């Protein structure tokens, strides 16, 4: 590939971390996220002359489009690692904050890909509504409505799950 | 009822914690890190408020939070066992010294009843809250005690471990002893004075 110059190197160095984390939250798999990042950087490089003014949204758009079905295709991930040599019950009541995060993360995974992407871009990548709309290629109103619908679903599922959990204790 | 703001804070904390599972080159912007830190602290307060009415067992929970972008990632498989002892003083409202420690991976330890209602709990070295034992908590720590339940007192302490560059949250749930408990402000003062926890150090 032709030499893209120091600007591209700076972009890769400065944006790779946040792009990788965003990809991971979108697809739910570390290795797939790394593949998505690599593909996004490659495509950004190919279109560097057009993307160089604002490359991050371009790369994010590639990641969102390629990774929107990633989480849905994932099996149930193992989130606990056994600690050998520790006595005590195997399945204790989890910490409340850990529980809330796990419930929320599971609920996010169940969201439609577009709504999940809106949440990740807005509340992790910290994009504005306008920036999110640009990345997703939709209107500002769509971003707002998708955010509203996603938060409503998450609130319902989180509240229900926590109530069920505490009712069982 | 969770407001949109609370839910957004929960989401930020959840995304930050989940993404912290990745080790990667230098991290997010300072603005995002600050917002994530605030969100984590709010998360603790919110979930404690939700949980306090449903406490059925006495339990101590330790949960490490990794600062996003710090390069330190929790890895339960690397935990070394039995290096520290953390003593919960009677001022937390316990009367029989009973308590449990639940590790992030779901396993539990039972505390050892001590004198005057104190309870000694074994910590993994990588989970030891050094800010509780070796230096006064810095400006990031919070302590909230809840006495809503007549049977239990719940104290949530959150602070940054300056050595390991991560956040630790202790949720202490123990049987109440109204004659031997401190209220919120007294608890804060106790912690601020650095006498809330006794630390025995490595027990080789």
Image (tube, coloured by chain):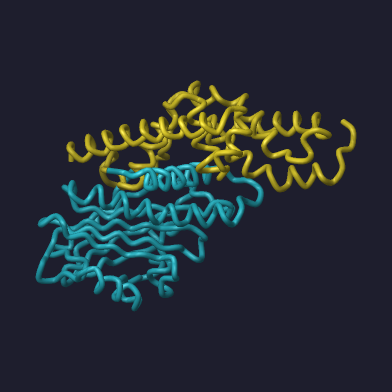
**Residue B204 appears anywhere in the view:** no
Color used for chain B?
cyan
Residue at image location 48% in from the left, 29% down from the top: A115
Colour in which the image shows chain A: yellow
Q: Is residue B173 left or right of residue B126?
A: left
Quarter of the image with the C terminus of chain B is: bottom left
What is the residue that sits farthest to the right in this orientation? Answer: A2
Q: For residue B92, what is the image quadrant?
A: bottom left
Residue A84 coordinates in the image, percent (x, y): 39, 44
At x 50%, y 54%, the residue is B35
Q: Nearer the viewer, residue B201 or B37?
A: B37
Which residue is at the front of the view, A81 or A167? A167
Q: Is residue B91 left or right of residue A137?
A: left
- The spot of residue B106 in percent (x, y) is 34, 43
Taking B90 as reference, is A18 above or below it?
A: above
Q: Is residue A98 visible?
A: yes
Quarter of the image that includes the N terminus of chain B: top left
């Amino acid at each position: 590939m032709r030499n893209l110059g120091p600007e591209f190197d700076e972009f890769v160095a400065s944006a790779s971390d946040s792009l990788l984390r965003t990809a991971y939250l979108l697809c739910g798999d570390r290795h797939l996220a790394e593949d998505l990042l690599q593909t996004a950087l490659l495509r950004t490089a190919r279109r560097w002359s057009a993307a160089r003014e604002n490359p991050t949204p371009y790369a994010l758009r590639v990641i969102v489009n390629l990774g929107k079905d990633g989480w849905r295709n994932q099996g149930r991930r193992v989130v606990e690692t056994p600690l050998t040599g520790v006595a005590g019950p195997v399945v204790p009541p989890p910490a409340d904050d850990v529980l809330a995060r796990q419930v929320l993360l599971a609920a996010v995974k169940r969201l439609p890909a577009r709504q999940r992407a809106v949440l990740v871009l807005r509340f992790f990548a910290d994009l504005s509504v306008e920036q999110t709309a640009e990345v997703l290629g939709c209107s500002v109103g769509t971003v707002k409505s998708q955010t509203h619908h996603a938060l409503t679903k998450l609130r319902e599922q989180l509240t229900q799950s926590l109530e069920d959990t505490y009712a069982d204790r | 009822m969770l407001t949109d703001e609370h839910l957004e804070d929960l989401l930020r904390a959840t995304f930050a914690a989940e993404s912290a599972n990745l080790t990667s080159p230098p991290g997010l912007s300072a603005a995002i890190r600050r917002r994530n830190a605030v969100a984590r602290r709010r998360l603790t307060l919110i979930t404690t408020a939700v949980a306090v009415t449903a406490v059925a067992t006495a339990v101590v929970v330790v949960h490490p939070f990794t600062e996003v972008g710090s390069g330190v990632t929790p890895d339960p498989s690397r935990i070394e066992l039995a290096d520290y002892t953390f003593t919960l003083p009677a001022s937390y409202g316990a009367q029989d010294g009973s308590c449990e420690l639940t590790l992030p991976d779901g396993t539990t330890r039972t505390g050892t009843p001590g004198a005057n209602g104190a309870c000694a709990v074994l910590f993994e070295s990588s989970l030891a809250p050094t800010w509780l034992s070796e230096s006064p908590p810095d400006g990031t720590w919070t302590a909230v005690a809840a006495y809503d339940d007549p049977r239990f007192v719940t104290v949530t302490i959150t602070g940054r471990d300056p050595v390991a560059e991560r956040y630790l949250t202790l949720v202490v749930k123990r049987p109440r002893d109204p004659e031997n408990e401190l209220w919120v402000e007294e608890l804060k003062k106790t912690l601020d004075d650095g006498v809330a926890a006794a630390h025995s150090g490595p027990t080789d």
